[in-house]
Image: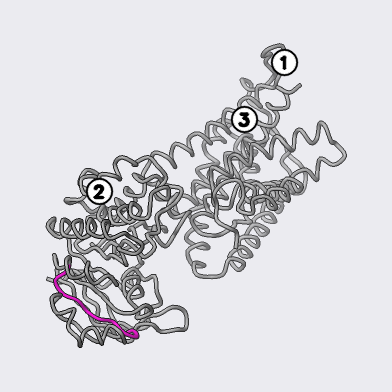
Amino acid sequence: MIALLIANSLALASLLIMLASGLALIYGLRDVINFGHGAIYMLGAYLGYTVSLVGGFWLALIVVPILLALLGIAFEYLALRPLQGRSHIEVALVTLGLGIILGQVIIFFYGGVARSVDAPQILSGSVTVLNLSYPVYRIFLIVMGLGSCALLALWLRYTSSGLYVRAVSQDPSVARMMGINADRLSLLVTSLSTAFAGVAGVLAGPYLSIDPGMDVTMIVNCLIIVVIGGTGSIGGAIVAALLFGFMQVAGSVFLPNIAALVPYILLMIVLLVAPRGIGRGRVLN
Amino acid sequence: MSALRIERLVAGYGASTVLHGIDLTVNEGESVAVVGRNGAGKSTLLLSVFRETNIISGAIWVHDSRVDHLPGYMAAKLGISIAPQGRRILPNLTVKENLLLSKATGRAGYWDLKAVYELFPVLEERANRPGTMLSGGQQQMLAIGRALMANPSLVLLDEPSEGLSPVLIDGLVGALNTIRQAGTGVLVVEQHLNLVKRATDRFIILAKGEVVGSGPTPAIGAPENQALMAL
């Protein structure tokens, strides 16, 4: 029972980690909460659906993140850079507006009905581990989630660009004076963040339903995670996603009547006890 | 040849103007002190080189490049680095990571981890500790080491003796002289005149955002200069 609970928490957390760490990265570099992130994730899911129909799931897992990385580059050049120097709320509203437009464009092309994607043959069915039968696809999801989380951590910890990203996230002014070009890093981080949203969108296909409301559900969850994790703290976002996944799954098992409230209760408790979140992030302006 | 040239600089923060037409030239390899009372505009002068202030008019040149219209990081890439006031060590980075930040300038030269560790051995001993776990004096060494790692032609130091004991100030003077011997120029904002006398060639006095006096360092104790510093 407990093992199943943990496995299901990890499966949910895997998607959340990919999305929330992308949000945290952009916030760290640009001081912008990208409210359009949910719509980018939804675009990833729908594009994943189309590419899967044409060329299969694996092709979608490669092509969609590349397409969304290109969208991230456009987002950086056309929105984030021109809006540098504007207030947080103005930029946040622009990202919210762009997200709404993108959502409507997706509905225009795909309609309002839910879609589903079948997992590839090799990932369908279940395996039995320690007398516990568990869907192979969810194990794949956990491996992808924890794998991307590990890659992200290794990049941030052991590469010079990762070091510069951490520096800009902590103190943009000192980073600038040390010769760090935040614009160039932001291009890298924004495209990485949207590519991760693409991976999450494609992976969500066989796991959750693809429907026009999936962006709102996910962005709300991710915002809670980023705030719990400490805004701008990527490590905090990863830990918060794991915690959130566990609370969400445990809540639906043990407290089904109030399961929907559990994330908000968690958010309230963290904000009361540690307003900066569990990571060492900056206070959200 | 000048490493830094500032011409008729008017700058401040938001709507308030702090500097009212500053002229200053520091040649390569030179060690210059900026002295004056609190609020005279000394830190504003240093921060303006990196466009951390609102530059209203005037020009700032690093070697042959005009930087007052370029992004702030360009001054560092062109050869100016800074140990800012309050040290501003990044708390989530280790001592070594703080030092490696300045490699972002892409400048090669005498200063690398080995040279900085030779100058400040304690930084090597604590290389893997968080930067802010160091004592005040050690954090100052880290801030200076971080600035040197950029291999600048001129390093700007803002109140490096702030909060240091007399023994540590002696060590700082030794470090500043070693930095000069390595061919790196120094522009130091400092209230501690003993340090200025032992580690710089000449000084300028700032009062209310204007240069009101200057001269070779041995003359800094002259009554007229003392009077100007009290303005």
CB atoms of marks 1 and 3 within 8 Å: no
The residue wearing badge 2 is B120
Q: How is the image coloured?
A: one colour
Identified at 66% across, 31% down, the residue is A11
Q: The C terminus of chain A lies in which quarter of the figure?
A: bottom right
**Residue B177 position within the rendered picture, expressed as x and y whole percent measured from the top left:** 16, 59
Q: What amino acid is found at the position of numbered circle 2 in the picture? A: Phe
| Secondary structure mainly formed by the magenta segment | strand
Q: Secondary structure at mark 3?
A: helix
Q: What amino acid is found at the position of numbered circle 1 in the picture? A: Leu
Q: Secondary structure at mark 1?
A: strand
Q: Nearer the viewer, mark 3 or mark 2?
A: 2
The residue wearing badge 1 is A132
The residue wearing badge 3 is A141
Identified at 37% across, 55% down, the residue is B136
Q: Chain of mark 3?
A: A
The one nearer the camera, B120 or B222, is: B222
Q: Is residue A240 above or below residue B38?
A: above
Left or right of A184, for residue A203: right
Q: The N terminus of chain A lies in which quarter of the figure?
A: top right
Task: Report how far apart the C-alphas of labels 1 and 3 lie in the structure.
Answer: 17 Å
User: How many other residues sit within 10 Å of disc 3, few (<14), some (14-19) or many (≥20)?
Assistant: many
